[in-house]
Amino acid sequence: MSKPVAPTTPVVRAPVDLDGFAAIVGARNVITAAADMEPFLREARDLYRGVARAVVKPGSTGEVAAVVRHARALGLAVVPQGGNTGLVGGQIPGAESDAIVLSLARMDRVREIDPLTDTMTVEAGMTLLKAQELAEQADRLFPLSLASEGSCTIGGNIATNAGGTAVLAYGNTRDLVLGLEVVLADGRVWNGLNKLRKDNTGYDLKDLFVGSEGTLGVVTAAVLKLFPRPRSRATAFCAVASPEAALALLMLAKKQAGSALTTFELVPRIGVEFVTRHIPGARDPLSDVSPWYVLLELSSPAESGLDEMLEALLGEAIEQGVVADAAIAASLDQRHAFWTLREALSEVQKLEGGSIKHDVSVPVALVPQFLEEAVACVSGMVPGCRPVPFGHMGDGNIHFNVSQPEGADRDAFLGLWDAMNEKVHAIVTRLGGSISAEHGVGRLKRDLLPAVKDPVALDLMRAIKRAIDPEGLLNPGAVL
Amino acid sequence: MSKPVAPTTPVVRAPVDLDGFAAIVGARNVITAAADMEPFLREARDLYRGVARAVVKPGSTGEVAAVVRHARALGLAVVPQGGNTGLVGGQIPGAESDAIVLSLARMDRVREIDPLTDTMTVEAGMTLLKAQELAEQADRLFPLSLASEGSCTIGGNIATNAGGTAVLAYGNTRDLVLGLEVVLADGRVWNGLNKLRKDNTGYDLKDLFVGSEGTLGVVTAAVLKLFPRPRSRATAFCAVASPEAALALLMLAKKQAGSALTTFELVPRIGVEFVTRHIPGARDPLSDVSPWYVLLELSSPAESGLDEMLEALLGEAIEQGVVADAAIAASLDQRHAFWTLREALSEVQKLEGGSIKHDVSVPVALVPQFLEEAVACVSGMVPGCRPVPFGHMGDGNIHFNVSQPEGADRDAFLGLWDAMNEKVHAIVTRLGGSISAEHGVGRLKRDLLPAVKDPVALDLMRAIKRAIDPEGLLNPGAVL
């Protein structure tokens, strides 16, 4: 369903003392058999097959530190891994390095919930879903939400600065983290489990580790921000004539609803067709066909008032000609049905053949221009291809996925992956955008960075890497 | 009114070629006469008197880069300065270094306003007030707000990660900045004027420079986030029996009002007395005396609905016994009168004699415990002293200011500054707090860091400083 796997070159390496790891974490937590390591060395899209000496599963921060020190003594690189759901190969050791996978899976405990401070301190291996549930039990919201939330982990979310569907209102993962505990490449532990909303005593180390994809340190625990739980929601599925109209609707919604606007997702007509074709029971809630749609949701801790706000907003939008038609969810079932039209988009694309993906962002105002140029570009490249651009318009983040022409040869189409990426990324870069809006760099996009990134920024990144991990022990081959 | 000035040791230095600066910025923008330099070498509290070869005022990013290169060639340190309103001496060159002051004052232009992307790109020397006004002209809000906003600059706000009165709803300065342009110590320019809400292509350099107090680079321009303008506000001045009751009110307000809660400021009785004593026309809006008060404000982009929300909230709070009494502002004049009871607190303390200050934060849940311990501590140290703790309770950030006993000797009292700081900071540190919540480290608190900061964090900060400014050219003596 995606880009073909690069063949892995077999490497023969001299044996090293792996028993030392067992002495730290227990023999049952050191995996060396190829078949047992496989779930840790392959990832969901099968873009990468990793090579490792062992998968080591420490159960505490002290054990993580000891494992890192032992790996360093052996000259082995350390590739931290959470739920192994990353989409850019950052969690899979490359064949070029002699490495262990350090799985945080056993470190899944909650250390503290402090509802008065609105914080929760959890270990890195906790799944995002579990963190969401813990927050809910404390009558709070942990707003990070993404497709893989059942299996991805907080540590991985932090390492990749995960985005998701709630960024418009609550920000990216970095905005949801107050403090970190990190094991450094030399085995020392930085205790930065800060619960403070304000602390100006020096450089912002927290944000340096967030999004560094395991190349600067191993995140072992974090203080997460909690929010009041929304007590009401109002959801609409809106037909708009164009991305320009969607942008006008976004401006109107921000102006009228402010921070109550928590979702603003763009969906193209072809996306609705794919979903209604493949998902049993899914249907288009609007009677007329529209080239574009917006899934718009307001939420509020207040018990009431949102329905009126949404009706006033849509009334104004229709009066201004910004929205052609809209359906308002009258029940929880209807709300789920609207969300399915957005959330099933990745899944249904797999059923329509090969798909070439781009996780990109541009300044919000330039989303319409980007879509126009990118659709023209890929249509010129592959006549009959079916662009399915969708996603977080409120953040300027479009998943610009392109499905193969109907009936075309899948592998031949996917063979154009790099060439199409190059052209689309050129448009993104010209518009001041990012070629990795929310998935990170990992191994997939590392070699693309020099072409799109400010050279001074790359130099600064390299200088920081050298300063913090001078031996290049942590996740070599990722990001830089 | 404050801690006495440390005497400056006169230093005789060999002459250097200052004409090179004039060749870059023009002779009129190089100040060398002692009297003309004085406004740049003293700060508001008169805690520091600086020593510099010259004050150099570049007019463009290219000129900043050239000035930094020339200073480096001469072996002169560079101390960046904005509005010279910093409270910890970070903008004043110490006598120990051979330095120039690099004033960003001439770089005060707006480069772009992009209301569709909700961003504004401005130069570092623009005053905060001007930035607020520009946003308003574009029908947007730039929410950063603090006492010195008429003269402090965006560059200084960024260098110190300024806080202020809107942090509860909108975050600190770092949360309000999307991108930066920075001149590095070697004179290269990092163009990071990113307008993106999502960009995961590498380490978060932006947040490394925000709050680094001019020690890692010279911020020359920034992309600021804009927000919808509030169209309604509802403001209450509430009597609460204790900090615990204030905390309970905070929980209730968050739960019921969510992100509409934009202000939650704690004011002690003595603060109200000071303001009503010294500010003409100021009065206590409540009939009964209360030991503590909360200034609470809701705001929303919606035209209506807030008054009802505030009334419901206060009704519930009174029913629960959390609030003893409350006044709701019925007019803009009343709103300003309520705010005066909070905003005049710093000013009126000056009229009550010497005041020893602490800009500290603790986890929100621990504010009551901190206040109890800190008040007992300073009262034990100086019987009759008058603690006036006030500020941003919603962020856990208390300005723990202590006024001298009535009729006591001012200088003798202020002589206890360091001793009192030490005791109060020990409480703060034990409670997991910060000894500089929003003012930064500068020169004032540099030597306090080793006692309160995780040693691994300090090592990481030093490693980063060496990596980015290996010669120690930028603002030596500040922070580290």
Image: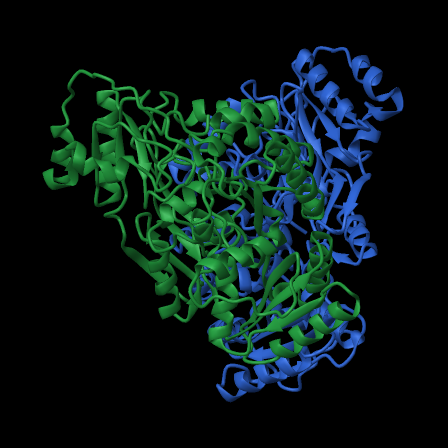
Chain colours: A green, B blue
**In this rendering, position of residue A220 left or right of residue A243:** left
Residue name at image x 44 percent, y 22 percent: A466
Q: Nearer the viewer, residue A30 or B174?
A: A30
Furthest residue toward bottom: B319
Residue A49 position in % (x across, y down): 31, 31
Furthest residue toward right: B28
Choose top left, top right, bottom left or bottom right for residue A378: top right
Residue B335 position in % (x across, y down): 74, 73
Residue name at image x 68 percent, y 79 percent: B305
Residue A61 position in % (x across, y down): 26, 43
Choose top left, top right, bottom left or bottom right for residue A120: bottom left
Furthest residue toward front: A407
Residue A75 visible, this angle? yes
Whether residue B399 is situated above or below residue B72 in the rendered picture: below
Residue name at image x 50 percent, y 78 percent: A331
**In this rendering, position of residue A268 left or right of residue A313:** left
Residue B226 position in % (x across, y down): 70, 53
Residue B433 visible, this angle? no
Whether residue B345 is situated above or below residue B38 in the rendered picture: below
Whether residue B416 is situated above or below residue A94 in the rendered picture: below
Q: Nearer the viewer, residue B117 or A354?
A: A354
Whether residue B312 is situated above or below residue B453 in the rendered picture: below
Residue name at image x 54 percent, y 80 percent: A303
Choose top left, top right, bottom left or bottom right for residue B91: top right
**In this rendering, position of residue A338 left or right of residue B229:** left
Total tally of numbered discs in the picture = 0
Q: Nearer the viewer, residue B275 or A209?
A: A209
